[in-house]
Image (cartoon, grey):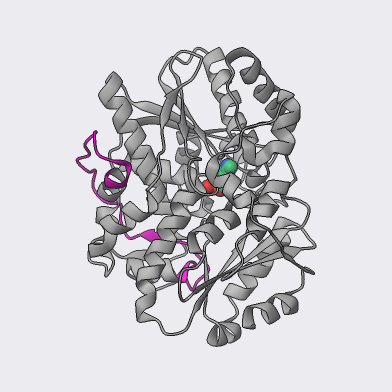
């Protein structure tokens, strides 16, 4: 399988090269030259086996092909349970049982495991530069921590991530450098992008990205959608539908790809916060990237969803067809808070603010008479967002053991101005 750029101005490359590069040289995103045929998938496999079955055609002919099973075992070594909710035919797919309690652990661990194998051919240490609004940086830092020959530099907007997210970002040390930037997430992303496009700097310190544009993060995320929908099919003989809390569209796109490869998934819908770029497009408007606005579901504070370009490519730029294929809603902070409170009062269920946008969307669908089997995707553990969730519940949340272990370590981050010279000095050090 070869990979081409969404902008068609770069040569086709193999998977290893696409994973190592992150962005294509023409500024586009790597996509497979053609989508693989539907797969024969079987229920009863482990999560790692389900992921490998889906990923196999994407690895065909690549140097990493022989390592695929081992990479999947390393990345998918914790559960993604599908659980029944208090309301009939409603389920939740819990993706927060990894080391940093968010779904990004799956993709980050897969990428680390793949790069670790590619690195053997490389001489100089590779620096992973990652801009984060909270969860990405922690997942990447945890996945790459103490990996020989790899270093991580994380940029996050100072004061705009939750206290526990900040702690997670600063608690690794060793080969992980946390920079708290006096600016917004967009400033962090602009700095990271500039570094990744700086050929002069790259000649001295090779860089790679680990943002959600990386195929090494995107593709493995298909695994849990296939696994959950197959399990549901086996148990109920019915396809599963998903509502996915969405920011950069990486997790959502993985579900779309899993479905096209044969996972028994029917409809896919996206929920988001007050950042309305996708809802406006899917409601018939133009695609107009904007500055992001800050919300209590901060991992989805995205004004220019990076994987949108891939979704458009998948629909061959046919925007009317794309608009018809998906529904997206925007959920404001007040509704998120109310949803968290109500589900707790009525059913004893506790959701993080991102997941709550999906729960609200599903409630709205049920109100319109929708009767299929649905799963909301729980993208993070609520204890990660304690400053939002605990006041709503009026009690403190139990912290999952992996997260508790990180929070018990000391943490520190270096302050920097949103200034490119400051970052490049740090990357050269
Ligand atoms: C990253 C993140 C999202 C958004 O995922 P995308 O792949 O960017 O759409 C949603 N919820 C949580 C908790 C996240 O960390």
Asked if residue 158 lies left or right of residue 217, the reply is right
Residue drawn at x 36%, y 72% is 118
Q: Quadrant of the C terminus?
A: bottom right
Q: Quadrant of the N terminus?
A: bottom left
Could you tell me residue 241's position as x and y percent?
41, 28
Could you tell me residue 393's position as x and y percent?
71, 24
Residue drawn at x 72%, y 30% is 390
Asked if residue 224 lies left or right of residue 397, the reply is left
Q: Nearer the viewer, residue 321 or 269?
A: 269
Residue 290 visible to an observer of this rendering: yes
Magenta stretch contains residue 237: no
Q: How many marks?
A: 0
Residue drawn at x 35%, y 70% is 117
In the picture shown, does residue 109 fall above or below 48? below
Residue drawn at x 59%, y 57% is 137
Residue range of the region highlighted in magenta in the rendering: 21-49
Image region (quadrant) for ligand 1:
top right
């Amino acid at each position: 399988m070869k990979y081409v750029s969404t902008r068609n101005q770069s040569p086709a490359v193999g998977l290893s090269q696409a994973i190592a590069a992150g962005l294509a040289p023409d500024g586009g995103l790597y996509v497979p030259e053609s989508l693989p045929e539907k797969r024969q998938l079987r229920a009863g496999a482990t999560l790692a086996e389900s992921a490998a079955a889906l990923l196999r055609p994407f690895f065909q002919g690549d140097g990493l092909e022989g390592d695929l099973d081992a990479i999947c075992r390393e990345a998918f070594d914790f559960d993604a349970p599908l659980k029944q909710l208090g309301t009939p035919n409603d389920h939740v797919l819990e993706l927060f049982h990894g080391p940093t309690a968010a779904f990004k652990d799956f993709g980050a661990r897969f990428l680390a495991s793949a790069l670790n194998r590619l690195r053997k051919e490389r001489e100089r240490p590779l620096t992973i530069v990652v801009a984060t609004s909270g969860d990405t940086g922690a997942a990447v830092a945890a996945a790459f921590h103490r990996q020989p020959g790899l270093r991580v530099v994380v940029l996050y907007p100072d004061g705009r991530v939750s206290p526990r997210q900040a702690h997670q970002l600063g608690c690794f040390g060793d080969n992980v450098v946390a920079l708290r930037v006096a600016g917004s997430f967009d400033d962090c992303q602009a700095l990271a992008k500039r570094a990744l496009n700086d050929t002069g700097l790259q000649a001295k310190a090779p860089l790679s990205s680990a943002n959600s544009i990386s195929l090494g993060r995107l593709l493995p995320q298909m695994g849990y959608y296939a696994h959950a929908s197959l399990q549901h099919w086996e148990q109920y003989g019915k396809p599963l539908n998903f509502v996915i809390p969405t920011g950069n569209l990486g997790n959502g796109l993985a579900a779309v790809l899993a479905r096209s490869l044969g996972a028994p998934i029917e409809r896919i819908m996206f929920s988001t916060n007050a950042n309305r770029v996708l809802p406006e497009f899917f409601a018939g408007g133009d695609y107009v990237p904007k500055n992001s606005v800050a919300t209590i579901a901060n991992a989805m504070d995205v004004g220019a969803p990076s994987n949108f370009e891939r979704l458009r490519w998948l629909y061959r730029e046919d925007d009317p067809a794309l608009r018809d294929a998906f529904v997206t809603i925007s959920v404001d902070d007040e509704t998120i808070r109310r949803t968290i409170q109500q589900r707790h009062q009525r059913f004893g269920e506790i959701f993080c603010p991102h997941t709550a946008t999906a729960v609200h969307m599903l409630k709205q669908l049920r109100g319109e008479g929708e009767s299929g089997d649905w799963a909301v995707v729980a993208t993070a553990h609520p204890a990660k967002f304690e400053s939002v969730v605990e006041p709503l519940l009026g009690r403190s949340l139990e912290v999952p053991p992996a997260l508790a272990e990180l929070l018990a370590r000391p943490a520190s981050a270096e302050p920097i101005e949103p200034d490119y010279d400051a970052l490049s000095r740090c990357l050269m050090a």
